[in-house]
Every structure is written in C-alpha cells, then in structure tokens.
C-alpha cells in the first residue's frame, strides 16, 4: 500500500495523571499490534508536566522492564494542536525556529488513563479542533471518570450498584465526624478510593475506624473528592463492550473472572500490572444464565452513560446471586495483562483486529454534535 494512502493515526499517551506509566504500557502494546501497512502512526507523548512531544514509537521503550515503569520524558520535539477547527493538523515547535506543520491526522487514539485525559478533557480539545478520535465523548468520559457521578447515572437508569458514600473536600475539612459516621454506617471493611482515578492507585481496604483517616488522606493525595464503598461479599467480574458495527447495538465480550491470591487483599496495582497475585478466568465460571445477564448489563451501562467506541464494565457477582455494577472504564488498559483485550480475544476478536475495529469506528463517526 502506498505511503500516502495510509490512514494517519496520532497515538497519544502518557499524560499528567498518576496513571501515566500504565498509559505508556498501553501505548506500547498498541504500537506493537497496529497494522503499519494500513496505518501511519504519529506517536504523541504527554509528559507529566503537560508538555506534548513527538515521542518514541518503539514498543520496547514503553514496556515494564525489571519492575521499571516507562514514562514520557518530554525531550522530543514539542507539539501543538491548533484549535481553529482546521482538519487535524499538528505543529512542531523547535526553539528559535518558526513552528512547522507535522501534517494532518485522520484520527486520534487517546490512550490516556485518569484525569487530564480519560475524563473528557482531551476529548473536548479534540472536539474543538474537529478531529475524530477513538472512544467516548466529553460527557460520557467525564461522568464515567467520576465514580460518584457514574453511580448516580447508573442508578437513574435502574442499574444496581453497591452501597457507598462520597467524601467531598469541604466535608472532610469542616465535618470530619459526620463523614466518619456516614462511613461507619456502611459497615467495615470498606474500600476508600479517589473518586477520579483508576488502575487501583490510591485505594485502601479499611478494616476498622482506626485505619480510616490515613486511607482518606492517601486517596486525597490523588483526588480531593473521595468515594468510600462498602465491601461486597462475592466475586469480581469484568466485561468488555464495543460500539456496534455500522450504528448497531453495542456488543459485549465474554466476561472474565478475577481471582486474587497471596498477600493481596484486593485487585490492586501490583495484581493488575506486575503479575503478582491475580489471574483471569475467561470465560468467568458463572452459573447458567448469569454470563448472559452480565453481558446484557454491560451493554445497558454503556448505553446509560452514552459511551462510544469501547468500555470495560466491572461487576460484583454476590454470594446471594446478585449482579452489581462497580464501575465503567471508558479507556480500559490495553497492556499484555489487561482484561479488555484478553476478553475480546476469547470472544473472537484478536488484538490487531480490536485496534483496527476501534480506529474504523472512530473514522466513521461524524464531527460535531451527534
């Protein structure tokens, strides 16, 4: 295929959030799988200080190696995206020189996790610039990123979540006793989480009141808004969702069951990404009829939030047979150990085909309101 006929894809990764490294690992996995005969890749890294640079496209440099997490170091040529609704042009800024055009891109693949990326911010930037991109739009990205708002939207659509309470910055500063009482009413143990973070960063399992304050402060280091969830007795189940082909109904993957072992009290960062103490069973071992119910609920959650492109929906299958939605991730991890690509591979969509489907879905998306 001739060079000029290839579809130009800006793969954006890194970012300002605490999930910077996982975004880099995700990008490395995608760069290793993307069909370079069909797609021309422009690797765009965002350093932790927010600088956009022309980054490496070498998957090996974006992998976890000997426990070392990769990062965008910000040393590449600086990039900017003009916000004047011209067709997707990127500019290169070199000190002492006039900015030069890197060229137009056909579609952006924003492989960003957490705030300043997965939360509607980059989606809004791309909307302003009239650039097509993979994944959910501004509202769905923002609502799903904030676990408190996400649960409100899901409950409003008749979808059941577990008990929780929200700890705002103001409440923690001015009414800490009321906050502690509200949390105690959930019953211990509880899980204390940053409301707008992912990859299990900043999460603590709290077994009693004496551990609570430290856990809240640990979560507040990542987000001043904290959500506290009651522990659910049951199993963790995940399910992938893809936007339907040609405007049809969204499709759900086979679900995965998460098994935690060793010294890990829950599905934490080390379990997810460093291969310590967890395993996935695909399809999840569920009673007859429950697998299909999980898949149906995953699609309902996707639609309730107005998601586009892709999402991963996380569930609890309780000991008494209920299926509760825990959260929705609009840009799930694509690392080699991530559940999302593994679930779709088990459903018949391998990694390269999955990346291709996401890009083709985005290319068909109309610009502007939809």
Image (cartoon, rainbow, N blue to C red):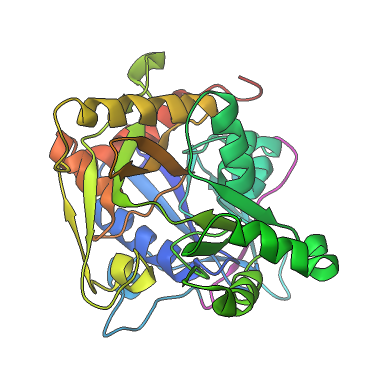
Residue 74 in picture, x, y percent from top left: 56, 75
Residue 36 in picture, x, y percent from top left: 27, 48
Residue 149 lies within the magenta run: no
User: Residue at 31% of width from left, 33% of height from top?
Assistant: 357
Location of residue 240 with respect to 301 vertically, above or below = below
Location of residue 145 with respect to 216 vertically, above or below = above
- Residue 185 falls in image quadrant: bottom right
Seen in the image, is 22 located left or right of residue 319? right
Residue 158 in picture, x, y percent from top left: 52, 24
Looking at the image, can residue 119 be seen? no
Looking at the image, can residue 261 be seen? yes
- Bounds of the magenta segment: 73-85
Prevailing SS of the magenta stretch: loop
Residue closest to the eye, 279 or 20: 279
Residue 310 in picture, x, y percent from top left: 40, 36
Picture quarter with the N terminus: top left
Residue closest to the eye, 336 or 169: 169
User: Residue at 49% of width from left, 54% of height from top?
Assistant: 230
User: Count of labels shown?
Assistant: 0
Picture quarter with the C terminus: top right
Residue 81 lies within the magenta run: yes
Seen in the image, is 360 located left or right of residue 138? left
Residue closest to the eye, 275 or 135: 275
- Residue 50 falls in image quadrant: bottom right
Residue lying furthest right: 174
User: Residue at 65% of width from left, 24% of height from top?
Assistant: 368
Residue closest to the eye, 283 or 242: 283
User: Residue at 45% of width from left, 23% of height from top?
Assistant: 364
């Amino acid at each position: 295929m001739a060079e000029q006929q290839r579809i130009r894809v800006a793969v954006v990764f890194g970012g300002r959030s605490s999930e910077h490294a996982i975004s880099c690992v995700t990008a490395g996995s995608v760069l290793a799988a993307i069909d370079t005969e069909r797609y021309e890749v422009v690797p765009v890294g965002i350093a932790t200080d927010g600088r956009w640079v022309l980054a490496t496209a070498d998957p090996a440099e974006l992998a976890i190696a000997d426990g070392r997490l990769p990062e965008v170091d910000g040393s590449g040529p600086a990039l900017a995206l003009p916000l004047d609704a011209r067709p997707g042009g990127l500019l290169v800024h070199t000190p002492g020189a006039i900015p030069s055009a890197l060229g137009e891109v056909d579609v952006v693949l924003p492989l960003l996790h957490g705030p300043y990326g997965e939360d509607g911010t980059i989606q809004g930037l791309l909307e302003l610039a009239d650039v097509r991109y993979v994944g959910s739009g501004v509202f769905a990205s923002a609502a799903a990123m904030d676990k408190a708002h996400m649960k409100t939207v899901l409950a409003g659509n008749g979808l059941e979540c577990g008990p929780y309470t929200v700890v705002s910055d103001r409440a923690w500063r001015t009414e800490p006793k009321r906050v502690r009482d509200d949390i105690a009413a959930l019953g211990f143990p509880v899980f204390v989480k940053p409301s707008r973070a992912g990859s299990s960063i900043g999460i603590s399992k709290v077994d009693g009141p004496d551990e609570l304050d430290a856990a809240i402060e640990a979560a507040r280091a990542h987000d001043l808004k904290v959500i506290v969830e009651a522990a659910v007795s049951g199993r963790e189940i995940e399910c992938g969702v893809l936007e339907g082909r040609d405007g049809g109904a969204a499709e759900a993957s086979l679900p995965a069951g998460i098994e935690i072992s060793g010294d890990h009290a829950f599905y934490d960062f080390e379990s997810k990404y460093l291969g310590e103490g967890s395993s996935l069973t695909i399809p999840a071992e569920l009673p007859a009829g429950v697998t299909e119910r999980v898949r149906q609920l995953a699609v309902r959650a996707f639609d309730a939030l107005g998601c586009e492109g892709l999402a991963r929906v996380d569930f609890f299958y309780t000991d008494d047979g209920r299926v509760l939605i825990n959260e929705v991730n609009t840009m799930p991890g694509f690392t080699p150990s991530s559940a999302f690509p593994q679930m779709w591979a088990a459903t018949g969509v391998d990694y390269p085909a999955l990346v291709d489907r996401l890009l083709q879905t985005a290319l068909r998306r109309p610009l502007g309101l939809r």
